[in-house]
Amino acid sequence: TEGKDKEIIGMRAQLQEARDVAAAAADTAMKVEDMRRLAAAAAEEGGLRIRQAEARALEWQEAVEYRDHEATDMRERLFEARATAAAAGQAAIELEELRAASAAAAEEAFLRLRQGQERAGSDAALVAAELEEARRAAA
């Protein structure tokens, strides 16, 4: 019986060892499950942060594209304004030249008119003198 007792004691030790191993395995399994849950939560949170970062990056990209479009539009308007200013400057030069030519033509016309009036006045005086002479001769 002593052999059987030793065998039972050995089996009990093995059973206790198996129970300890099973308890340690269960504890490890619980720890692994806790770590899996934590990892899943961290992955979900990380995924959420990635999606948020991607959304912010998209917003920034859209804002940059909008600003780039605005800058391009502004450059085009500036180019048009410069072209308009250059055309207006040229038109102002041409208008001043036309004004000067018109003023010179008006001055020349006024001078001719005055000379015409003077000639007409002297011609009228001459005609009046001839008429007066003809009246005297007729009388």
Image: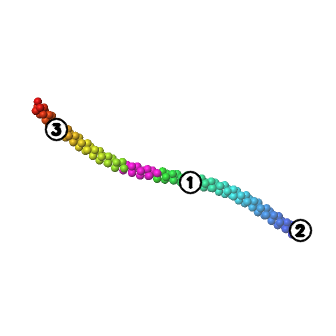
Q: Position of residue 101 (x, y in %)?
A: 27, 46
**Comparing labels 2 and 1, the label whose residue is closer to the camera:** 1
Query: CB atoms at circles 3 and 1 under 8 Å apart?
Result: no
Please state which amino acid type lies under the numbered disc 2.
Thr
> Which secondary structure type mostly characterizes the magenta part of the structure?
helix
Residue toward you, 103 or 85 = 103
Query: CB atoms at circles 3 and 2 under 8 Å apart?
Result: no
Residue toward you, 45 or 6 = 45
Please state which amino acid type lies under the numbered disc 3.
Asp
Q: Is residue 13 above or below residue 90?
A: below
Residue at horizontal 32%, vertical 46%? 95
State which region is magenta: 73-86
Classify mark 3: helix, strand or loop: helix
Q: Is residue 41 found left or right of 115 in the rendered image?
A: right
Residue under label 3: 123
Residue toward you, 64 or 124 = 124
Q: Position of residue 12 (x, y in %)?
A: 82, 64
Q: Is residue 42 visible?
A: no
Q: Is residue 59 above or below residue 115?
A: below
Distance Cα–Cα, label 2 vs label 1? 82 Å
Earlier sequence position, callout 3 versus callout 2: 2
Rendered image quadrant of residue 26: bottom right
Residue under label 1: 58
Which residue lies most toward the bottom here?
3
Residue under label 2: 1
Question: Label 1: few (<14), some or many (≥20) within 10 Å?
Answer: few
Classify mark 2: helix, strand or loop: loop
Residue toward you, 67 or 88 = 88
Earlier sequence position, callout 3 versus callout 1: 1
Question: Label 3: few (<14), some or many (≥20) within 10 Å?
Answer: few
